[in-house]
């Protein structure tokens, strides 16, 4: 069954205390190449049937109305998940 992915992030102008905490932890671990971290949310909606532009538009509306708190968050992506294929005999 197809899956639609919705990604939500805090608005860029707002502080992200969770991201700041992770950035601090990375610095303490000596991982200084990372200058910032922002933490968001990912929703996966499984659908019964094909995904078309009309369905994606409906999910965008749902994301704005229900999944994101648009006062402090932006919906940054709504897309169909890529189907992973594994070659015969390949393991992960």
Image (cartoon, helix red, strand yellow):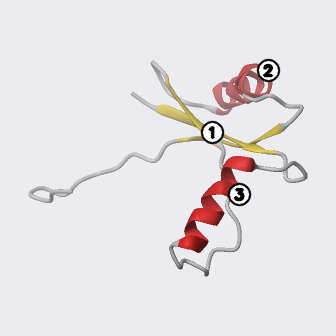
Q: Are marks 2 and 1 in contact (CB under 8 Å)?
A: no
Residue 52 vs 49, above or below: the answer is below
Could you tell me which residue is drawn at 65 percent across and 49 percent down? 39
Mark 3 or mark 2, which is nearer the start of the sequence? 3
Can see residue 38? no
Q: Are marks 2 and 3 in contact (CB under 8 Å)?
A: no
Give the crowd class for mark 3: few <14, some 14-19, many >=20 residues within 10 Å. Answer: some
Can see residue 69? yes
Could you give the CA–CA distance between mark 2 and mark 3, rounded to whole angstroms?
A: 28 Å
Mark 1 or mark 2, which is nearer the start of the sequence? 1
Most foreground residue, 11 or 76? 11
SS for dot 2:
helix
State the mark number for residue 65: 2
Depth check, mark 3 against mark 1: the one in front is 3
Depth check, mark 2 against mark 3: the one in front is 3
Could you give the CA–CA distance between mark 2 and mark 1, rounded to whole angstroms?
A: 15 Å
| Image x and y of residue 56, in percent | 66, 31
For this orientation, the residue located farthest to the left is 89
| Image x and y of residue 12, in percent | 85, 53
> Where does label 3 land, which residue?
20
Could you tell me which residue is drawn at 9 percent across and 58 percent down? 89
Residue 13 vs 67, above or below: the answer is below
State the mark number for residue 41: 1
SS for dot 1:
strand
């Amino acid at each position: 069954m197809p899956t639609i992915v919705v990604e939500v992030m805090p608005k860029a102008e707002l502080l992200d205390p969770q991201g700041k905490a992770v950035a601090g932890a990375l610095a303490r671990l000596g991982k200084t190449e990372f200058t910032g971290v922002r933490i968001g949310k990912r929703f996966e909606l499984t659908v019964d049937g094909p995904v078309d532009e009309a369905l994606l538009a409906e999910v965008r509306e749902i994301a704005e109305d229900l999944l994101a708190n648009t006062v402090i968050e932006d919906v940054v992506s709504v897309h169909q998940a890529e189907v992973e294929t594994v070659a015969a005999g390949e393991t992960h």
